[in-house]
Amino acid sequence: MSAVTVIDYGVGNLLSVSRAFEHCGARVTVTSDPSTILSSARVVLPGVGAYADGMASLQALGLDVAVRQVAASGMPLLGICLGMQMLMDESEEFGVTPGLGLIPGRVVTIPATTTTGAPHKIPHIGWNELVLPAQCDTWQSDLLADIEHGEAVYFVHSYMAVPILLAHRLADCHYGGIPISAAVRRDNVIGCQFHPEKSGEVGLKILRRFLLQ
């Protein structure tokens, strides 16, 4: 049975993430203990809410250090929603807040208008299609290897991650014509802006693939 450790820092959707992995056949450990995290096979950093609150909670428990150590060790690390955003260098949400610095880039607000200038709803909530970024021609041998171009997943967010390097954009979605980083990757560090645990069978296929990392 594959094992996965979900980090508990008081700001995550722990139950739904854990149940989704258990549905995929994984043995799930939920913990805020750095030594347990560092002895894991693979680690998930979930998260909902404000960026500054998430980083403050990680730091208060010493888990920012543990997450960086996980990344440096080569262990598979998956950030979900806020967890993905905190992988970046910083966020402009309610002032600039430094992040974990694992993927170069920053988190910025989703524009309030479409590419044609029409207003649209913020936050971006609901199902949206995953598409290949311009520089990417395949998802084979990656987290999305079992996903077809155009399959939909579930989003809830007002801010978006913008990696500095296009090579770190694994998948996009379009909202009002605006390309949004839906998934990012740098070596063993992966992030999903969407919620795979709330994305039905498509999300479960992604989680099963992570268990093979």
Image (cartoon, rainbow, N blue to C red):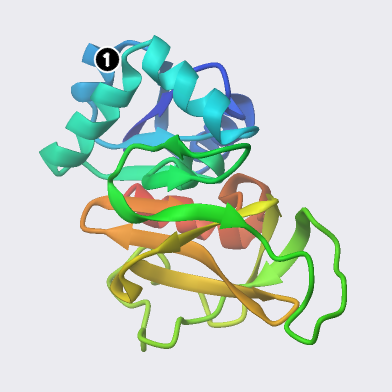
Q: Residue at x 32, y 25 (%)?
A: 64
Q: Which residue is mark 1?
A: 34
From this view, report whether residue 112 is shown above or below residue 138: above
* Amino acid, disc 1: Pro
Decide: few, some or many residues near mark 1? Use Cα within 10 Å; few <14, some 14-19, many ≥20.
some
* Quadrant of the drawing holding the N terminus: top left
Q: Nearer the viewer, residue 139 or 208?
A: 139
Q: Position of residue 192 (x, y in %)?
A: 49, 54
What is the residue that sits farthest to the left in this orientation?
Answer: 73
What is the residue that sits farthest to the front in this orientation?
Answer: 95
Q: Is residue 193 visible?
A: no
Which corner quadrant of the image does residue 164 belong to? Answer: bottom left
Is residue 125 left or right of 102 when viewed as pictured? right
Q: Is residue 175 visible?
A: yes
Q: Position of residue 138 (x, y in %)?
A: 36, 84
From this view, report whether residue 95 is shown above or below residue 188: above
The count of marks equals 1
Q: Position of residue 118 (x, y in %)?
A: 87, 79
Q: Residue at x 57, y 39 (%)?
A: 20
Q: Position of residue 187 (x, y in %)?
A: 21, 58
From this view, report whether residue 123 is shown above or below residue 202: above
